[in-house]
Image: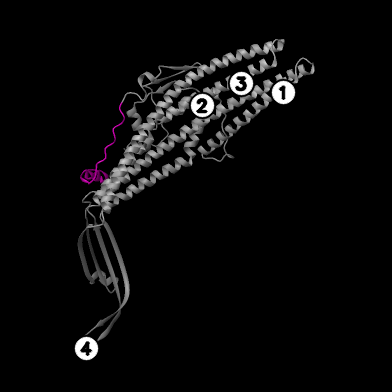
Amino acid sequence: MLIIGCAGLAGCALGPDFHRPEPPAGEHVLKKEEIPDSMNADGHAQNFDRQADLPGKWWMRFKSMEIDTLVAEALVRSPSLQSAQATLRQSQDSLRAGYGVFFPQIGASLDASRQVSYVNLPPPQGLTKVGPYNLSTLGANVSYVPDLFGGQRRTVEALGAGVDLQHDTVLATYLSLTSNVVNTGIARAGYQAQRDATLAIIHMLDEQIRLAQTQYESGTAAYSAVVVLKTQQATNAAAVAALEQRMDQSDHLLAQLCGQTPAAFTTPAIALEQIALPAELPDALPSTLARHRPDILAAEAALHQASAEIGVATADLFPSLTLGGAKGATGSTIENMLHSGARFWSAEASLAGSIFNGGSQWYTRKAAIDAYDAALAQYQQTVLTALEQVADTMRALDHDAQGLRAQVDALDAATEGEKLTRANFEAGTAGYLDLLVADLQLQQARLGYLGAVAQRLQDTVALYAALGGGWWSEDAPLSPALRTDSAH
């Protein structure tokens, strides 16, 4: 009831009343003609659908039990998420503490002392000692500062906006955590697939080196053919080492995201070919994006906070009224004080304000207005950046499909070319150089194909993250208080 009453009084507080900025207009993030009807490649199609929802557990659309397990572990153990949640609780408690300004402040005191007094009496007594004696005082006081110009209400409003800011920071941390886990898991699977493909090429080169060595020893080929093949094998071995380094880095990052040390963490085996590609992708309205992206909501909360600070600075220009009173009793003993001791009471009212302070308060208010203008510009920039990121990922997915189709064609052609060249080599109608060129083309095509598959999956993750991650959905693994956008 107190909160409702304070909200009603806020309308007469000095300073601007905050209104949420209007979301961006438009039916699409991209130009309509830039949105592809379908993105088909390697037997898997994706398309943008205005009716498609963004589920709270969007990562489950990749249909990888290993990725689901990693996300679940990260949500439970991540210190970054726990820190953000603790900071949210801190801001909520600060807001509750802030509401205390609307209540009278009541205090009580009990003093006991033993005293000696000297009294200057008329002659012949002169300076006379009185005592020693005991003196006990029991009193109560009450004070209240009426919020005449709304400064306290604006202060509490700023605290409330701070709660909103921390609420949205938790959402941003949650979104960053889940998307990083999924993205890193997919990247790790891609590195492993490329590593395995390169190892297969090395094994293939073992056979080619053996054949070349045999032909050299029989005098039908030059030793340079053996050297060239061994050089190619060493180059592939170096590529394997680089890919394994990336795998190790992915493992260590996953350990950190899941709140574990690298020594204690075991990365589940994630096979790239077993990760499904989500087919139906959301095509969100720009206005929906502005109401769901955690970074936009956080920028909006910061703007609200800056607006309330203008009201605080405006109220500081005016005098403040303090009402107070005290009542108590004194006596030589506590019993005497309660029954026959001296009674006292007082009441006071004071009005205090600044007459001249060199323009400090005036320019403090102007600084608050400038801070609001900066927060508004930052909010607008955050919205533009969000729209840019969504547009980038939507276009990236279209280009990914185009690139993957080209990689599939290149892989098919290289595979067929390598088979024909190998057959000719074994029949003696093709040389080592021809076989080496064919092997190189096949290696590059296979690695390019695997990289394109992983990139398409990772850009799909980026789209889900850019759209806000579906934290508001009922199936999102968040508390109902976080899923509900009540703070705004």
Is residue 4 located in the magenta-colored stretch of the structure?
yes
Work out whether mark 4 precedes mark 2 in sequence or the reverse, and give the earlier one.
Answer: 2
Question: In percent of the image, x 64 and y 13: which residue is there?
Answer: 419
Image side of residue 484 versus residue 439, left or right: left
* Residue 404 in the figure: left or right of residue 466: right
Q: Which residue is mark 1?
A: 227
Q: CA distance from mark 2 to mark 1?
A: 44 Å
Q: Residues within 10 Å of mark 4 (few under 14, many from 20)?
A: few
Q: Residue 319 in the image: x percent, y percent?
A: 21, 55
From the image, state whether disc 4 or disc 2 is nearer to you. 4
Is 232 colored magenta in this rendering?
Answer: no
Q: Mark 2 or mark 3: which comes first in sequence?
A: 2
Task: Measure how far apart labels 2 and 3 are at the Cα level.
Answer: 27 Å
Mark nearest the camera among 3 and 4 is: 3
Q: Which mark is residue 64?
A: 2
Label 3, label 1: how far apart the Cα atoms are: 19 Å
Viewport quadrant of the N terminus: top left
What type is the residue that disc 4 sits on?
Pro
Which of disc 4 and disc 1 is earlier in sequence? 4
Please provide the residue range marked out in magenta.
Answer: 1-25
Residue at image mark 4: 123
Q: Place residue 380 in its image quadrant.
A: top left
Q: Which mark is residue 443?
A: 3
Spatial distance from mark 1 to mark 4, Cα to Cα? 128 Å
Label 2 element class: loop
State how the image is colored. Answer: one colour
Contact? badges 3 and 1 (CB < 8 Å): no
